[in-house]
Amino acid sequence: MFSMKQGGNNQSSALVNLQLESGQFIGRVVHALGNNVYQVETREPDRKEDKYLLPKRLRNYIYIRRGSIVIVEPYESPQGRVRGEVVETFLPDQVKTLHKLREWPQEWNSVE
């Protein structure tokens, strides 16, 4: 007889790949502006709060809301109001792992 229980993903979501490619930043979503554009706060002094686009290939797979932790990659030559793309989002388990590894930005502790 078959079990009705669905199989789950056995990989741990707490494993965080902290190897960012050159030009990528960790940021926190401040506001959803509509049309898959998000205002993201980063720790970079010249990019404190910029607007980033969620690419079409990720729109059905990633759910982003205010306070989500994301990896953003700026465009090489931005045109218009959008400065780059959202590459990845962190799951809650991954954010906890960032806290444990002391990789969490201290200035974000007051909100979390």
Image (cartoon, rainbow, N blue to C red):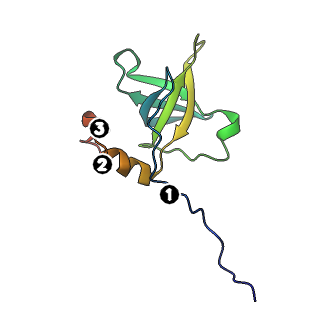
**Which-is-in-front pick, marks 1 and 3?**
1
Relative horizontal placement of residue 5, taking residue 14 as reference (left or right)? right
Q: Which residue is mark 3?
A: 108
**Which-is-in-front pick, marks 3 and 2?**
2
Residue 26 against residue 78 in the figure, above or below = below
Residue plotted at (34% across, 17% down): 45
Give x and y (percent) for residue 33: 53, 33
N-term mark: 1 or 3 = 1
Q: Quadrant of the N terminus?
A: bottom right
Q: Which residue is mark 1?
A: 12
Q: Which residue is mark 2?
A: 100
Give x and y (percent) for residue 46: 38, 14
Residue plotted at (65% across, 40% down): 58
Q: Quadrant of residue 25?
A: top left
Name the amino acid type tagged 3: Trp
Relative horizontal placement of residue 9, taking residue 104 as reference (left or right)? right
